[in-house]
Image: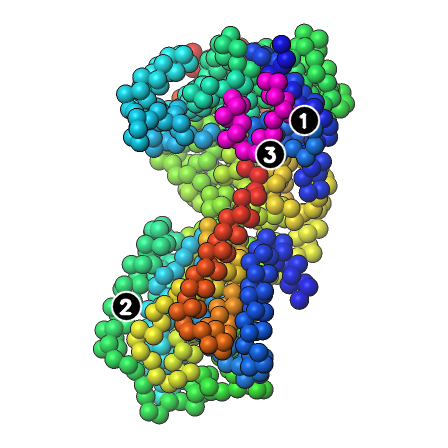
Amino acid sequence: MRPLIELQNITKQFPGVLALDKVSFTLERGEIHALCGENGAGKSTLIKVMTGAHEMDKGEYIFDGDSVHFKSTHEGINRGVSCVYQELSIVPEQDVAKNLFIGNLPMKGSIIDYKKLYSESKKILNELGMDVSPKSLAGDLSVGQQQMIEIGRALTRNARCIIMDEPTSSLSESETDTLLKIIFMLKKKDIAIVYISHKLDEVMHLSDRITVIRDGQNIVTVNKNEITEEELIANMIGRNLENMYNKKEVTPGKSVLEVNNLSSKDLFNNISFSVRAGEIVGFFGLVGAGRSEIMRAIFGADKYNSGEVIMNSNKLRKGSPSKSIKAGIGFCTEDRKKEGLMLQLSILMNMTIVKLKELTFLGVIKKSKQQEITNHYIDSIRIKTPSANQKTGNLSGGNQQKVVLAKWLMMNPDLLIIDEPTRGIDIGAKAEIYTLLGELAKQGMAIIVVSSEIEEVMGLSDKVITIHEGDKTAEFNMKDDPSREQILTAALGAENI
Amino acid sequence: MSNLKKQLKGKENFGVVAMMVVFIAIVVALSGSSFFTTKNIANLLRSVSVMGIMSCAVTLIMVTGNIDLSLGWMIGFCAVITGQHSGNFGEAIFWAILAGIGCGAFNGFLVGILKLNAFIATLGTMYAFKGITTLYSDGRFVTKLAPSEVLKFVGQGEIGGIPTPIIIFALFAIIFWFLLKKTEFGTKVYAVGANQRSAHFSGIRAWLIVLVVYTLAGLATGVAGTVLYAKVMSVQPYSGVGLEFDVLTAVVLGGTSVTGGKGNVLGTILGVIFVGILSNGFTLIGLGSNATYITQGIVLLIAMWADVKSSGGVRS
């Protein structure tokens, strides 16, 4: 039997970029096929060609034996190609059933057949193993459950192929496990899966075949057991990667930040810790444990009920990011699109927005200086862009994250808080960011790294603090060489150590 | 012109501008030689100067992603105040600007600090300003027999052959263009409009920026009110009604996005001139004001469509 999808020599050109250069790709029926590559390698473009979101310039697309040319995602969906995107498209104000059948509601004449809607929804929810009423509001579900709804939506459309773009990037560990089980269930139903993830352990665990894309070209397609994780990485970045966390030995200096008994109702209680110059402190805990909330309170973006934040021996005012910035705190937020960047504005404007005051004379911006410093950072942290005036929204995720970083590095903060520094970022950019953080610490910057990846926290930090349900459960000095299990146990709140 | 073209092209609203230019060319061709007389051009610019002064300031409000519907009655209020003090220019402009700043700051307080929806908040103040203006003027038309000479000069005089209202408009255009494009404040205006949350996390006090842009619009309206009165030395309390929509039309035609984060004063100036030509040119070729309204409406819709098309280009 022919494969479900055959792409032959697909070429797609965007202004100034050759996004896909004669890429060929096949998807067998009921196969789990992982698509790996760095940000900007062309994965997104490839799946957009598959779904019909982009039209290809050249090449042939054969679906189920027929040559097709989808002009919209609608056409793709009708043939059975569905996609679960990184950004969920749940309508939070509507119930689960309507979300499942959105755009495809069962009708009786010209009115909605509610009886069928709820009974069919129930069936789909059972299939997905979800213990949720079809009448509950979609907005009340967890992110993981919402993602299941998206997959369920594909099932209601009789999808024969489901493309998943970074499905686990915002899921907790148990939610990820559930998702992986469901993917295997789908495979049994002969639904083919294209799986995109930066998490290579998932890729190795899940997939039947792996395709690596780099610079718009298909580098290799192999069966999973024919490749090691190291080879995979080497193929993705086009070189061998040495030690990712190039940690340098630093003697911590004076205390920069002191947090005493910080509490915010229902979010976190009695958090105390300190960070010294040159020290990297890692905050580890599950998604929703309250780590980000603590950081937002310290930075002044959110208010808190009691406790104090002392920065360089001065007490910080509550709820004022501009005061915190003046006191020397930089904060790379977790969600770079919603809280970090202004996507429709240029790299130049985004990068210099915090430092702007220093680039002005009587309120007037010194353009050449602004341009110069932006170009300097674009070069030094290697942001891939044709110019500083490029819209930030046109950059890939990793490059966007670098713009956020550069924005804060420019102000040369005494303390840099960085929440999920590498979410949705490819491995090459990850390594670059780790190296950068290490160098900054060496120069005496105090750094807080919040992460839900334990390797990242352990590899980077001098000190690890675990948070469980808003409480600080433990503090580890990495010199004492704590084990992975010890840290995980503390983060799960199993017992206080 | 080529530099201007480049700048507008970069803002992706080139299509609308090109359309406006083609449109203008047709009107001009049909009206024959009567359009390109110095007198007609001066007339045209003079007729849009009041609206132009306000449009420059409203561009900033729209770039923050907000709107102001109260301007029509606000300018009526400022014009009436000018009329009441028209014997002394200093007093007249002082009170008109003060009233404008007061009204604008109040709008800014509602939208920036209380975080009310701008559309509804300024709809509310529109009614309030209507009441205040009507009460203050007793609902009657205001005129004084012995106006100050300076005031007369502001409305009817000329500097080097150019009518004073046009010069005031040009001055405002330059100031607001500079403010938006060249200053720290302007960049923050864009930032707030593009993503208020990111702006907050970058240490920008969004409430302050919003308060200031509304206050600036109030100031501009104060000046515009004085010019409005001075042009004919009499004013009806409701004479600004409808002006707010001409202003919004001009700003949107100029490529400013209704959702914020995008726009520029150069485009607004073109929009203002276009709206002026529409009524002036149509009159010249013998079409009435109703044809003008229909065309203005259609052009506005096309401009909105162009905005939707261009903002759809951002990779999500």
Q: Is residue B19 rendered to the left or right of residue A133?
A: right
Placement of A464 over or under A204, stated as above or below: below
- B214, B63: nearer the viewer: B63
The residue stretch that appears in magenta: A60-83
User: What is the CA distance from the residue labelled 2 to the residue labelled 1?
Assistant: 65 Å
How many numbered discs, if any?
Answer: 3
Classify mark 3: helix, strand or loop. loop
Specify the quadrant of the image occupied by residue B118. bottom left
In the figure, A323 relative to A278: above or below?
below
Numbered disc 3: what chain?
A: A
Helix, strand or loop at label 1? It is: strand
Farthest residue toward the bottom? Answer: B146
Q: Given the current orientation, which residue lies at the most extreme right position?
A: A239
Q: Return the x and y of residue B13 as percentages of the image width and height.
A: 57, 55
- Dot 2 falls on which chain? B
- Residue A54 got which mark? 3
Instruction: Name the residue tied to disc 2.
Output: B130
Q: Nearer the viewer, residue B139 or A420?
A: B139
Q: Chain of mark 1?
A: A
The mark found on residue A60 in the picture is 1
Amino acid type of the residue that numbered disc 1 sits on in the rendered structure: Glu
CA distance for labels 1 and 3: 14 Å
